Image (cartoon, grey):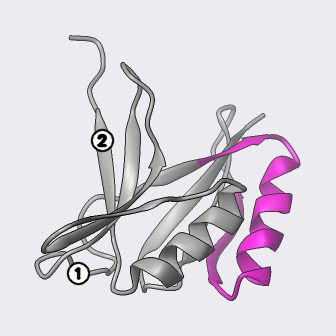
Amino acid sequence: MNKVFSWVEIPVLDIERAARFYGQLLERELIITDMPPRRMATIYFEPNEVGGSLLQSPDAKPGNQGAHVYLNAGRGSDLETMIERVRSLGAEIVIPATPMGSDGRFASFKDTEGNILSLFAEH
């Protein structure tokens, strides 16, 4: 087993608001699926790849505790483009673009639901 992660769920309070935010941030359409009492909006799914979704559920609470998710922001200056998109969508940058040695750079943001995630761009 080479793949360590297979699926990531980001907890949300308002699936429609969160789907709009992440759809615009990642420039993709997110389809909301109802599976009572859960509601999901898939961000990415491809067989044998790491995928993920937004999750609205009675037991899923947004916050800044627990696992930390890094979203792919591309390469180099793509990070600044994503940071500006985060700001334009009404989210807050909590850690500005920060070098990660020779690996690349990251920035962290608080989304519309109160989760803190990061963007990562390779050099």
Answer above or below: position of 71 versus 36.
above
Q: Residues within 10 Å of mark 2 (few under 14, many from 20)?
A: few
For the record, the magenta segment spans 72-98
In the picture of the structure, the residue carrying the numbered disc 1 is 61
Quadrant the N terminus occupies: top left
- Report the label total: 2
Q: Is residue 11 magenta?
A: no
Q: CA distance from mark 1 to mark 2?
A: 18 Å
**Label ID, residue 7:** 2
Determine the residue positioned at 39% across, 32% down: 50
Residue 31 in percent (x, y) is at 48, 59
Q: Nearer the viewer, residue 64 or 113?
A: 113
User: Can you say which quadrant of the picture contains the C terminus?
Assistant: top right
Q: Secondary structure at mark 1?
A: loop
Based on the displayed image, in which of its 4 quarters is residue 30 positioned? bottom right
Which residue type carries mark 2?
A: Trp
Counting from the top left corner in percent of width and height, residue 73 is at 69, 48
- Three-letter amino acid code at disc 1? Lys
Q: Quadrant of residue 53?
A: bottom left
Q: Is residue 84 magenta?
A: yes
Q: Position of residue 91 (x, y in %)?
A: 63, 84
Image height of 58 relative to 99, above or below: below
* Identity of the residue drawn at 84% across and 41% down: 76
Decide if residue 123 is on the left or right side of residue 100: right
Q: Residue at x 79, y 82 (%)?
A: 88
Residue 63's spot in the image, x, y percent? 32, 81
Examine the rendered structure and indicate whether residue 30 appears above or below residue 37: above
